[in-house]
Image (tube, rainbow, N blue to C red):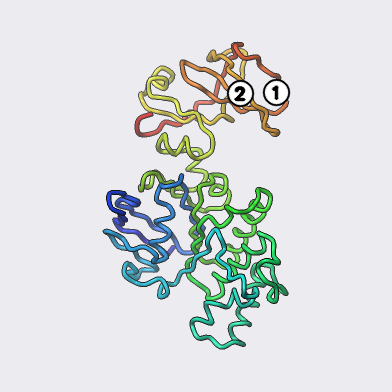
Amino acid sequence: MDIAVKFDGVSRHFGEVRAIDGLDLEIGEGEFFALLGPSGSGKTTSLRLIAGFERPTTGRIEIFGSDATDVPPYRRPVNTVFQDYALFPHLNVADNVAYGLRVAGVGKAERLKAADEALAMVALSGYGARRPAELSGGQRQRVALARALVNRPKVLLLDEPLGALDLKLREQMQEELKTLQRSLGITFVFVTHDQGEALSMADRVAVFSDGRIQQIGTPEDIYHRPETPFVADFVGSSNVLPPDVVMDLTGIRAPASLRPERIRLTREGHEAEVVGSSFTGATTRLKLRFRGMPLTVQLPSDAAPRAPGSIVHIAWDDDALHLMEGGA
């Protein structure tokens, strides 16, 4: 697989703030790649560096093997979809989609034909004469996508593009984006702070914290085999057991991740005290105190209630306890 985007020792500093610090990263051609992390972790700065909106303080950026470090945004084979859509309210949908082609000097007939084809890609054929104010949030998002795709970029950058949508529409758009990416075969680089969004959409995920990448892997690797306590705690819901507890359980001194759904209630096993519970619809989450630390267990929604203060017994399979590097 060819490399679409490569960061080689890239840093971006804003005064004393190290937004990105010595980043090495390779994104393959045709990948759906997610940059995942909390606010201020460096994921959006990384996206802006790919786009050319920021320049590295140190290091080198390559796009399809060519040094792009000093190449201006308009000369890069990339395009960006923003969270706020950035549509022109005074232009109709077709003219919004064709705007970049107009700036590039493409003739009217050719650019409107290209706009119609781009709108067809995002299931908006026949919407060209409408204004953005006449569209729903999901339709405006599709227009923004069509505008980004109309000039056929090699890399599409998506900066939390679904953040303004409600839950049901966001889930629908997640499916549509993944289907679109597969049909086009181009590289998508997707910034999000939503773990579920990254896990459900991406081929690979880079988890950011404090300007550095904590782990890169498939969604399955990131979820089931986190390499650090930060990744275990941030991605999904996990119980991070400190080294002294893990030492007592396994004889190995290291922090470990134990997902709530891997724990089961048993007649015999480790004792734990019930602190409380919460009903979430599909499941019931039982809050326990285990060896001096809080522990969450995920049970079926029809599980028998357990009164706070009662004692339960818990167990898990050996492979459920995943040892990690770093302190707890």
User: Is 204 positioned to the left or the right of 140 in the image?
Assistant: left
Q: Where is residue 89, by image quadrant?
A: bottom right
The residue under the point 46% across, 52% down is 35
What is the C-alpha distance between the residues marked 1 and 2?
10 Å
Q: Amino acid at mark 2?
A: Leu
Q: Are marks 1 and 2 in contact (CB under 8 Å)?
A: yes
Residue at the image point whose x is 62% and y is 27% from the top: 285
Q: Residues within 10 Å of mark 2 (few under 14, many from 20)?
A: many
The one of 209 and 181 positioned closer to us in this rendering: 209
Q: Amino acid at mark 1?
A: Ala
Residue drawn at x 49%, y 48% as measured from the top left: 218
Say above or below: 178 vs 274: below
Dot 1 falls on a residue whose secondary structure is loop
Sort mark 1 into few (<14), some (14-19) or many (20+) by Cα contacts within 10 Å.
few
Q: Nearer the viewer, residue 8 or 247?
A: 8
Q: Position of residue 18 (x, y in %)?
A: 31, 49
Horizontal and vertical percent position of residue 250: 42, 21
Query: 292 and 14: which one is in front?
Result: 14
Direction from residue 236 to residue 280 in the image, left or right? right
- Residue 69, placed above or below residue 254: below
The location of residue 76, given as percent across then percent down, is 41, 72
Label 1 or label 2, whichever comes before in sequence order: 2
Residue located at (63% from left, 23% from top): 277
Q: How many marks?
A: 2
Residue identifier under label 2: 286
- Depicted 230 relative to depicted 47: above or below: above
Identify the image quadrant of the N terminus. bottom left
Identify the element where label 2 is drawn: strand
Q: Which residue is mark 1?
A: 303
